[in-house]
Image (spheres, rainbow, N blue to C red):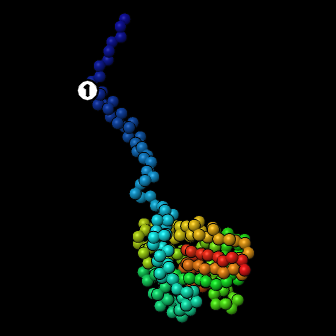
Amino acid sequence: MPKTLTWLTPFSWLTLVALAGLGLGGCKILPTPVARSENSASAFNPDKMVEDIWASKVIPYLRQKAGPFAEVHALAKTDPAAAGAKYGNPRKQANSPWTFAVRVEGKIVAANTQSRAGTMDIDVDGDGKADARVQIGPAMRGTALRDSLDFVQFNDFTNQIDFAQFGKAFNAYAGKTVLSKLPREALEGRTAKVLGAYTIEGGQDLPLVTPAEAEIGPKP
């Protein structure tokens, strides 16, 4: 005997629609993730930023601004503001220490090349004692190169992290393009010429200079 079809009343249809709506209400509709383009305008590449300005802006600025180490350091110890106005960045943040652009020339009297944070101590006045300590890496600390530039301002960056990474990028670029080419054996007794920057900090044995240019003479 054939089955009879059961017709739904309008009330039954409304009931089914309501139940279906309740079922969907317990589900979450998630957006499909969209991959960020590598060429996105928000991409931040501090290494590329430093590379782009190094030869055209950073080196010319330091060459023009830097003074002989003995002259700069003598003034910095007695009148940091006057030294900063002449050899530093007058547009620095008010609570930041002065950072001075400087030329260091003299004889290497000690060197530390066993550590990744390598250094060489330089006698600039000929008395046989070290006057400045120059970082030769490959690991270098501080942001002296960034902080010495009057065309680099914190407000130009999105946040403190980006600004800090930009500072580290200067050290990385100097290490890759300049310091990696220096000899690291038998440095004592050789002459050295350095263009760089330093900040006076408490607790330092010697002023710590971060170089942007460096040259080491032949063995004596």
Tell me the residue at 36%/33% (across/down): 20
Look at mark 1 in the image and give the residue it sits on.
10
Tell me the residue at 32%/17% (across/down): 6
Query: Farthest residue toward the left?
Result: 10
- Quarter of the image with the C terminus in it: bottom right
Q: Is residue 59 visible to the viewer in this orientation of the structure?
A: yes
Front one among 185 and 198 = 185
Give how far across and how far down residue 36 sits, in percent: 44, 51
**Picture quadrant where residue 77 is located:** bottom right
- Quarter of the image with the N terminus in it: top left
Against 165, is 104 above or below?
below
**Picture quadrant where residue 123 is located:** bottom right
Query: Farthest residue toward the bottom?
Result: 78
Tell me the residue at 67%/83% (across/down): 107
Front one among 185 and 156 = 185
Front one among 163 and 108 = 108
Give how far across and how far down residue 121 sits, in percent: 67, 81
Q: Residues within 10 Å of mark 1 (few under 14, many from 20)?
A: few
